[in-house]
Amino acid sequence: MDKAGAADTLTGGPRRVRVRGERGGAPLPLLVPALIGLAFLVLPLVALLIRAPWRSMPDLLTSSEVWQALQLSLLCATAATAVSLVIGVPLAWLLARVEFPGRGLVRALVTLPLVLPPVVGGVALLMALGRNGVVGRWLDDWFGVTLPFTTAGVVVAEAFVAMPFLVISVEGTLRAADPRYEEAATTLGASRFTAFRRVTLPLIAPGIAAGAVLAWARALGEFGATITFAGNFPGRTQTMPLAVYLALQNDPEAAIALSLVLLAVSIAVLAGLRDRWMTAS
């Protein structure tokens, strides 16, 4: 037995080679900009906490205007998430499981709202669903439905910008899931829809839950598309981000208080997704 084998025997196995770049100290040219980047991201949040009017916070958060905006935000974000689930999960399944011409283009169009400026999304919604829009004129003439500047319009705007988060999350989970379970179910006589409902949905439930949480948080914080498509009417279309924008002009302390509420929601979302994003491999 050579010396290396004897050492392995005494230590209980082969020695691991420690890579200096993985566990050693960070080089200064990388450490300094990394710390600057961390401070750049964290300092504004710390400043928000420092400048928060903690003594008057209960009065600010219990005012009728703030309560209306909070209730409307929670209602619309939840409704937008429900809409995203109903039409987004089947869309994710289509992209992940069905081969068809132009699938890459469809996937690009689905993810486009992620990079599209929200105001542009609001203008596009007006052109499509406005009273004189491509589809909106028929909705108005045939059913008497008008979406812009209504609470339903808020839900539509939030779903437009939030659904891609759900679709991407669910599609990734579907691609990671083994399709042989679905094939086995269809071999035993189940229809494709029954296999999806009884086999696939339980398998991808964690991905659906994560995508729904992301979509809900994105809908809650939506501003640009909402104010463009639905306006800013208190009690009807004024959500929390719109209330923050309005309060910042007249009552900065109220704007800080509302911002802290949205910050708390964001932290809660991260805490709920810690197993997905905040664990080391």
Image (cartoon, rainbow, N blue to C red):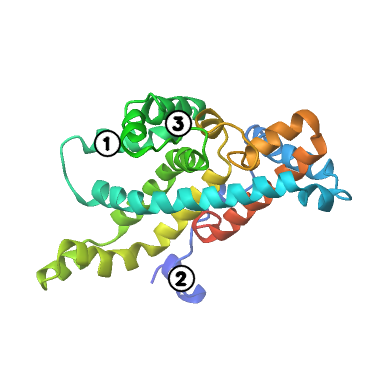
Q: Secondary structure at mark 2?
A: helix
For the point 52% across and 33% down, the residue is 149
Q: Is residue 111 above or below residue 75?
A: above
* Marking on residue 115: 3
User: Quick one: 260 or 42, which is closer to the camera?
Assistant: 260
Distance Cα–Cα, label 2 vs label 3: 54 Å
What residue did someone put label 1 on?
Answer: 106
Quarter holding the N terminus? bottom left
Amino acid under disc 1: Val
Amino acid under disc 2: Asp
Distance Cα–Cα, label 1 vs label 3: 15 Å
Q: Closer to the N terminus: mark 1 or mark 3? A: 1
Q: Are marks 1 and 2 in contact (CB under 8 Å)?
A: no
Distance Cα–Cα, label 1 vs label 2: 55 Å
Q: Secondary structure at mark 3?
A: helix
For the point 82% across and 39% down, the residue is 253
Residue 231 at x, y percent in the picture: 57, 31
Q: Closer to the N terminus: mark 1 or mark 2? A: 2
Residue 87 at x, y percent in the picture: 33, 49
Is label 1 or label 2 in front?
1
